[in-house]
Structures are given as structure tokens and as C-alpha cells.
Image: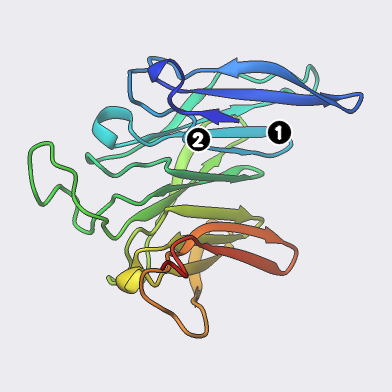
């Protein structure tokens, strides 16, 4: 459970169910945390790995942290910073997902060509965005496998929401096309990722934010459009 404003820097709480009751097991904080980092703004968990996003680290470049559970003791390893944004306002870690040995992290503030068009400390408006896939080797070393971007420059807010399952990834871009939104689907073969689909409603409408949240169960994909039907 993320608490990104706890103590000013952010925290993550880990709960475990025992005998039908949920018990707090640990509270995690980022190493070398700074006020306003928003550690815990995004979290993801699978059987052996937990991932935490801190999108406001280092002038909103953002950062992603990961921990692995020891299969023998059941204890979690100390948090390791596995990725960081390259430019201010990228906001890497605004959304995170984990599946096995890979982590997917959204950076919705990335703009094509890098840099800040306004200069100084002024955040740019919603930019194209990107998402990064990180992979861990048997020794526990993380590397960036690929940076995913939409094939069209019209995408906006790409990486606000991410979902990773097996060899498939889904990335929401809710500000695309006057905030009608879109979801981009990717498939992995080995370590190569390819965009295979762009999902939109049958009748896209402006200012609906389609792609702002994602969930999947089996062959069904659930897509949130939090701005739809506003009066």
C-alpha cells in the first residue's frame, strides 16, 4: 500500500494475510529520500518481487525501486533503485507493473527529443510520454531492456497507466486526441517488443481520459475513462 506523502518523502506498507486477518509486516522507505519524492505513488507486487515508483525524485525525473523475496527465508531484500528519469519532469515511476523478471514503468512527462521546452524550472504540459521495461538477470542485476513509445507522435500522457502480464504490455495514454485517450498494446518475443494494437472505444469522444487506468483478467481488459460523462 503506497502512502506517497507520509513524512513528506513517502512510504509503502506491506501487509500479509494470516489466519484470515491482514497484518502489517513492514513499512518501506526509499534510500536517500528527499521531501516531495512521492515514494509510493505507484506500487506493484507479484509472488517474488515488489516495485515502487517515486515520480517526483530529482526535479520530477522520477525513479523506480525494486525488492526481491528470498525463497527460503521469505524476507525481502533491501530496496534497489533500478531506473531513473533522464530529464526533469519525465516522472518515471508514475505507474509501475511487474511480471516475473521484468518491470514496466511509465514516464508520462517525457517529450520527444528530450529537454524542457520552457526551460528553467517550469513543468511542460502533458507530453508524449514513454514507458521503460527493466529486466533482472540471475545475479540480481537490473538493466533497461527497452523504451516503449507510441508509433504516432499524437500520443499524449503515454505511461500514465501500465499493465504487464507475461509477454504482453498495455500502456495508457489518456490525453491523446484531445483527451479522448488510447491504450497501446505490445508483445515481446525474446527481448524484442513490438506494438501490436491501439485500442480505443468504438466512438471516441474528447475529454474522456480513456486509458487512465488498466486491469486485466484472462482475455478481458478493463480500461478506465475517468473524465467521461462530465456535466
Q: Residue furthest right?
A: 19
Q: Residue 33: where, in percent of width, then height?
A: 38, 17
Circle 1 residue: 48
Q: Is residue 217 left or right of residue 81?
A: right
* Rendered view: 32 above or below 171: above
Q: Residue furthest front?
A: 231
Disc number at residue 61?
Answer: none
Judged from the image, the secondary structure of the residue bearing numbered disc 1 is loop
* Rendered view: 212 above or below 4: below
**Which numbered disc, 2 or 1, marks the residue closer to the eye?**
1
- Image point (31%, 39%), residue name: 85
Q: Is residue 67 left or right of residue 148?
A: right
Q: Quadrant of residue 221?
A: bottom right
Q: Is residue 156 left or right of residue 104?
A: left
Crowding near the residue tagged with mark 1, few <14, some 14–19, many ≥20 C-alpha atoms within 10 Å: some
Q: Residue 148: where, in percent of width, then height?
A: 41, 58
Q: Residue furthest left?
A: 119
- Image point (71%, 24%), residue name: 15
Q: Is residue 151 left or right of residue 21?
A: left
* Rendered view: 58 above or below 119: above
Q: Quadrant of the N terminus?
A: top right
Q: Residue furthest bottom?
A: 203
Circle 2 residue: 142
Distance, label 2 to label 1, CA atoms, is 15 Å
- Image point (47%, 70%), residue name: 229
Which of the pair 15/132 is nearer the observer? 15
**Lower position in the chain sequence, tag 2 or tag 1:** 1
Q: Residue 204: where, in percent of width, then height?
A: 44, 80
Amino acid at each position: 500500500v503506497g502512502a506517497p506523502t507520509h513524512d513528506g518523502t513517502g512510504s509503502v506498507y506491506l501487509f500479509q494475510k494470516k489466519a484470515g486477518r491482514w497484518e502489517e509486516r513492514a513499512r518501506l522507505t526509499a534510500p536517500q529520500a528527499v521531501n516531495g519524492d512521492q515514494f509510493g505513488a505507484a506500487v506493484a507486487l507479484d509472488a517474488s518481487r515488489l516495485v515502487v515508483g517515486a515520480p517526483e525524485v530529482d526535479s520530477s525525473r522520477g525513479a523506480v525501486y525494486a525488492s526481491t523475496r528470498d525463497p527460503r527465508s521469505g524476507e525481502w531484500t533491501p530496496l534497489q533503485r533500478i531506473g531513473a528519469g533522464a530529464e526533469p519532469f519525465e516522472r518515471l515511476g508514475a505507474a509501475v507493473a511487474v511480471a516475473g523478471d521484468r518491470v514496466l514503468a511509465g514516464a508520462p512527462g517525457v517529450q520527444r527529443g528530450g529537454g524542457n521546452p520552457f526551460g528553467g524550472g517550469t513543468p511542460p504540459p502533458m507530453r508524449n510520454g514513454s514507458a521503460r521495461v527493466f529486466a533482472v538477470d540471475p545475479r540480481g542485476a537490473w538493466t533497461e531492456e527497452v523504451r516503449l513509445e507510441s508509433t504516432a507522435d499524437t500520443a499524449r500522457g503515454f505511461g500514465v497507466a501500465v499493465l504487464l502480464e507475461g509477454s504482453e504490455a498495455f500502456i495508457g495514454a489518456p490525453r491523446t486526441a484531445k483527451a479522448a485517450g488510447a491504450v497501446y498494446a505490445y508483445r515481446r518475443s525474446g527481448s524484442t517488443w513490438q506494438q501490436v494494437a491501439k485500442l480505443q472505444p468504438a466512438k471516441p469522444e474528447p475529454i474522456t481520459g480513456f486509458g487512465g487506468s488498466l486491469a486485466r483478467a484472462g482475455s478481458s481488459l478493463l480500461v478506465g475513462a475517468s473524465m467521461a460523462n462530465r456535466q
